[in-house]
């Protein structure tokens, strides 16, 4: 049995990407950009992890457009983050099946819990306060967000930082992820990976994962 479970957030704990997409599109409109990300385009853009990085990547593909300064990207991202929080706070994004039960079962077995994500601490807080209550963070021994580390997934940084904060060896943990980028990040940190397939990553290559599930309800069943 693993000493700790390390959870990705977007796609793993909840199907958040449609809310991220909506928040991006609303932020573009508010900031006077004529960008619009449809589902198919967003699926491709998800290869680039991190909202700021994703907008940069999109801008880099456009022709004959004025340059975007880092502060423009930062402002867009602040706008997007506020819009995302407002969406999440409506309560429209529950935890995925089996997540709450797995968290509870892990706690009762004495397993430690951690979060290793590309998104921001504000976004995790918006989602988990809504789903688990204001004191949600006290159940987690390490919470590492995208901007806490130098390189986002698929780099291993966020997982290495999580292991350092937990003071555990990689082989004593299990990472729970929904994307190939997440699988690569955890694998580069030598952490075994369990995949829970999400909406945008149904057809990803999950070679190297220990287990691939459609959702976590299977695991959370009482033994
Ligand atoms: C998800 C991401 C994030 C979100 C947007 O990664 O790549 O960029 O799409 O969030 P993970 P931000 O599943 O590892 O959390 O705009 O805050 O980056
Ligand atoms: Mg994810």
Image (spheres, grey):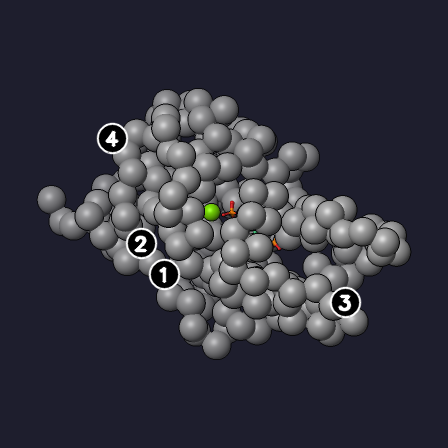
Q: Secondary structure at mark 3?
A: loop
Q: Mark 3 vs mark 4: give the one in front.
A: 3
Q: Residue at x 52, y 56 (%)?
A: 40
- Category of crowding for the residue at label 1, using alpha-carbon neighbours closer than 10 angstroms: few (below 14), some (14–19), many (at least 20): many
Q: CA distance from mark 4 to mark 1?
A: 24 Å
Q: CA distance from mark 1 to mark 2?
A: 6 Å
Q: CA distance from mark 1 to mark 3?
A: 32 Å
Ranked by sequence position, the earlier of labels 3 and 2 is 3
Q: Which residue is mark 4?
A: 1
Q: Residue at x 28, y 58 (%)?
A: 97
The answer to whether the residue labelled 1 contacts the one labelled 2, judged by CB atoms less than 8 Å apart, is yes
Quadrant position of residue 25: bottom right
Q: Which residue is mark 1?
A: 95
Q: Which mark is residue 33?
A: 3
Q: Is residue 163 above or below residue 14?
A: above
Residue 124 visible in the shown view? no
- Category of crowding for the residue at label 2, using alpha-carbon neighbours closer than 10 angstroms: few (below 14), some (14–19), many (at least 20): some
**In the shown orientation, is residue 63 left or right of residue 120?**
right
**In the shown orientation, is residue 150 left or right of residue 217?**
right
Q: Residue at x 23, y 42 (%)?
A: 109
Position in image of residue 159 (x %, y %) = 51, 33
Q: Is the N terminus in the top left, top right, bottom left or bottom right quadrant?
A: top left
Q: CA distance from mark 4 to mark 2?
A: 18 Å
**In the shown orientation, is residue 171 left or right of residue 19?**
left
Q: Which mark is residue 99?
A: 2
Q: Mark 3 vs mark 2: give the one in front.
A: 3
Position in image of residue 175 (x %, y %) = 39, 36
- Category of crowding for the residue at label 4, using alpha-carbon neighbours closer than 10 angstroms: few (below 14), some (14–19), many (at least 20): few
Q: Secondary structure at mark 4?
A: loop
């Amino acid at each position: 049995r693993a000493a700790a479970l390390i959870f990705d957030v977007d796609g793993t704990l909840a199907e958040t990407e449609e809310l991220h997409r909506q928040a991006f599109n609303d932020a573009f409109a508010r900031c006077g950009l004529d960008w619009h990300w449809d589902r198919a385009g967003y699926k491709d853009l998800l290869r680039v992890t991190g909202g700021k990085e994703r907008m940069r990547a999109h801008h880099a593909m456009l022709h004959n457009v004025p340059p975007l300064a880092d502060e423009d990207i930062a402002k867009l991202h602040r706008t997007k983050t506020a819009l995302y929080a407002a969406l999440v706070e409506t309560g429209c994004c529950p935890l995925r099946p089996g997540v709450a039960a797995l968290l509870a079962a892990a706690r009762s077995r004495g397993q430690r819990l951690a979060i290793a994500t590309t998104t921001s601490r504000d976004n995790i807080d918006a989602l988990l306060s809504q789903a688990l209550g204001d004191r949600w963070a006290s159940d987690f021994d390490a919470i590492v967000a995208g901007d806490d580390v130098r390189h986002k997934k698929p780099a291993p940084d966020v997982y290495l930082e999580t292991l350092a904060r937990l003071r555990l060896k990689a082989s004593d943990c299990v990472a729970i992820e929904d994307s190939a980028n997440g699988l690569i990040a955890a694998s580069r940190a030598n952490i075994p990976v369990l995949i829970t397939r999400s909406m945008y990553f149904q057809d990803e290559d999950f070679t190297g994962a220990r287990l691939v599930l459609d959702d976590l309800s299977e695991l959370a069943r009482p033994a």
